[in-house]
Amino acid sequence: MSSEAKTVVVAGAQGVIGRAAAEHFHGLGWNVVGLARRAAADDLPVRQLSVDLLDRADTEAKLRELTQATHLVFAAYVERPTASEAVAPNLAMLRNALDALEAAAPNLEHVTFYQGGKAYGAHLGTFKTPAREDDPRHMPPNFYYDQEDLLRERQRGARWHWTALRPEAVCGYALGNPMNLAMVIAVYATICKELGLPLRFPGTGAAYDALYQVTSAEILARATAWAATSPAAHEQIFNITNGDYFRWRHLWPAIARAFALPVGDALHIPLAEYMADKGPLWERIAAREGLRPIPYAQLASWGFGDAIFGMDFDNISSTIKARRAGFPECIDTEEMFVSFFEGLRRRRVIP
């Protein structure tokens, strides 16, 4: 994969997906420009621009200088209370970024964007599994569909191409990200240990035994780099997961061992309710252990954890299409979790 004269713009560079992608492209020797609404992150080793992609004028002004951009990785996302409310802002961000880059960068070659299990209706209930990329859409609204339709329309007659990647429950390092399952588990387990409790699976009994899958942010970043330069990825959608399936009942003991905790019986504990009062406890842990002074509210999204741990049906997708197209990489999920927790300790995020 040649990095000669390649400049990738990563929208949402401080999120779990965007950060991993920015770091991976940086490691490959590409020129990387990270976009985020927040101020530049000290630990992200790429050029960073603070921009509000919802503000068309701000986006045009900030991206006007990116004349050498050849690739756009769109990992920006804003959360809204309902599916219908999420369409307009998420579509506007993509349109604003694309409009600004098309105007500024005549050599734009490729756009990668992300969907996920919600494309199959995973958030609605039982769906056909293993899910395949050619499965029919569910009843809208779903902003994934609107973004995809925008890119399909805009690509006609353009010299650039697009690829959509569909991960599930991305696990990686980022703070203040609303959808980061690994951080939910790490903070929950740390608090259980502090309180002298066993590590109980906090979801439903059916979810404990259902088949599930996750996606390492590292694997997704590698798939993003592959899609950016592979003609086989042009105007295609690919499921990207670790490549294995698991049941929480069998994985949970390995997670408990990573925190030197016994495994307790599964007990449905709504995390959004029962973890809401643990901020002062976390502050005491952080002060005693010399952890980074990260606000408790930015560590984990308990509502997202409740959604994942409440999935009482199989949630698996086929990765055959990506493998046939030339992306064969995979990772053992148990090893991924253990490695991630070790990384959080090195970063002084957990003790």
Image: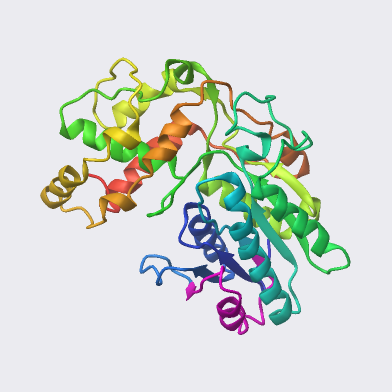
Residue 278: image location, x then y, percent: 21, 41
Q: Quadrant of residue 180?
A: top left
Is 330 rendered above or below residue 289? above
86, 99: nearer the viewer: 86
Residue situated in front as seen by the camera: 189 or 55: 55
Q: Position of residue 37 (x, y in %)?
A: 46, 68
Does residue 177 appear anywhere in the picture? yes
Examine the rendered structure and indicate whether residue 291 appears above or below residue 251: below
Q: Nearer the viewer, residue 332 or 191?
A: 191
Q: Note whether residue 339 is visible.
A: no
Instruction: Tell me the quarter of the picture where residue 9 sits.
Output: bottom right
Residue 316: percent from left, percent from top: 61, 28
Quadrant location of the N terminus in the rendered image: bottom right
Q: Is residue 278 left or right of residue 337?
A: left
Tell me what residue is drawn at x 80 percent, y 53 percent.
235
- The colour scheme used here is rainbow
Q: Residue at x 75, y 68 (%)?
A: 109
152 or 322, which lies in front? Answer: 152
**Residue 215 vs residue 205: left or right?**
right
Residue 24 point in image, percent of width and height = 53, 58
Residue 12: within the magenta? no
Residue drawn at x 65%, y 55% as measured from the top left: 113
* Left-right relation of 102 to 39: right
Magenta stretch containing residue 66, yes or no? yes
Which region of the structure is painted magenta?
A: 47-72
Quadrant position of the C terminus in the picture = top left
User: Residue at 44% across / 48% down in the picture?
Assistant: 178
**Up/down of 348 relative to 140, above or below:** below
